[in-house]
Image (spheres, rainbow, N blue to C red):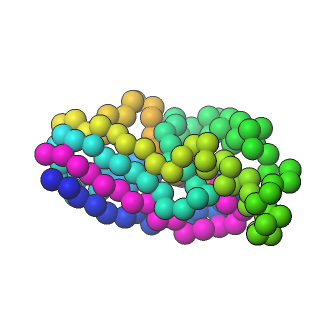
């Protein structure tokens, strides 16, 4: 069985981290799949899907690490080409990737106790994000 759906999210940008676990779990329940795979993919080149312990200290640590890896205050060739100032957001998203796949066993995603699914919006302005969710299995 295949089941596809979308989740729409409003994000603030600038490494906004949003817990999407419950929304993805709702899609999984709608699908009726008990065993298989669920793929979660953000549409766009300036955001990522990842997992993290959704706790304010860890979230701040992640934001600080991302700023060290791809600083927002240095020149980027993309900005010279397009003048939109979001070169850093493209680089950040390429490191963390647009999506991931999670095993589904017994109707549940195989996430750890402190592991949540998150959307991370790196753009330099608020955005409406669309996340594609696809469930495959029995």
- Asked whether 60 falls inside the magenta stretch, the response is no
Q: Quadrant of residue 82?
A: bottom right
Q: Quadrant of residue 64?
A: top right
Where does the C terminus fall, quadrant-wise?
Answer: top left
Please name the residue shown 76% across and 60% down the image.
78
Q: Is residue 26 visible?
A: no
Please name the residue shown 66% across and 47% down the image.
92
Q: Which residues are magenta?
A: 122-138
Please name the residue shown 80% across and 57% down the image.
77
Q: Is residue 92 left or right of residue 76?
A: left
Q: Is residue 35 left or right of residue 5?
A: left
Q: Is residue 4 left or right of residue 47?
A: left
Most distant residue in the right direction: 74
Please name the residue shown 58% across and 59% down the image.
45
Please state which of residues 69 and 54 is positioned toward the viewer in this rendering: 69
Please state which of residues 63 and 102 is positioned toward the viewer in this rendering: 102
Q: Is residue 62 visible?
A: yes
Residue 137, relative to residue 103: is it above or below?
Answer: below
Q: Position of residue 39 (x, y in %)?
A: 35, 49
- Asked whether 129 falls inside the magenta stretch, the response is yes
Q: Is residue 96 left or right of residue 124?
A: left
Number of marks in the rendered image:
0
Q: Main secondary structure of the magenta part?
A: strand
Q: Position of residue 105 (x, y in %)?
A: 22, 35
């Amino acid at each position: 069985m295949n089941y596809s759906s979308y989740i729409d999210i409003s994000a603030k940008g600038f490494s906004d981290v949003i817990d999407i676990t419950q929304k993805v779990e709702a899609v999984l329940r709608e699908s009726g799949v008990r065993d298989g795979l669920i793929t979660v993919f953000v549409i766009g080149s300036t955001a990522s899907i990842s997992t993290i312990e959704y706790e304010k200290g860890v979230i701040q640590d992640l934001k600080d690490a991302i700023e060290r890896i791809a600083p927002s205050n240095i020149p980027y060739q993309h900005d010279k080409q397009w003048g939109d100032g979001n070169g850093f957001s493209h680089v950040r998203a390429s490191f963390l990737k647009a999506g991931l796949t999670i095993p589904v066993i017994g109707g549940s995603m195989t996430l750890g106790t402190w592991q949540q699914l998150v959307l991370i919006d790196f753009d330099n302005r608020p955005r409406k994000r669309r996340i594609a969710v696809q469930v495959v299995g029995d």
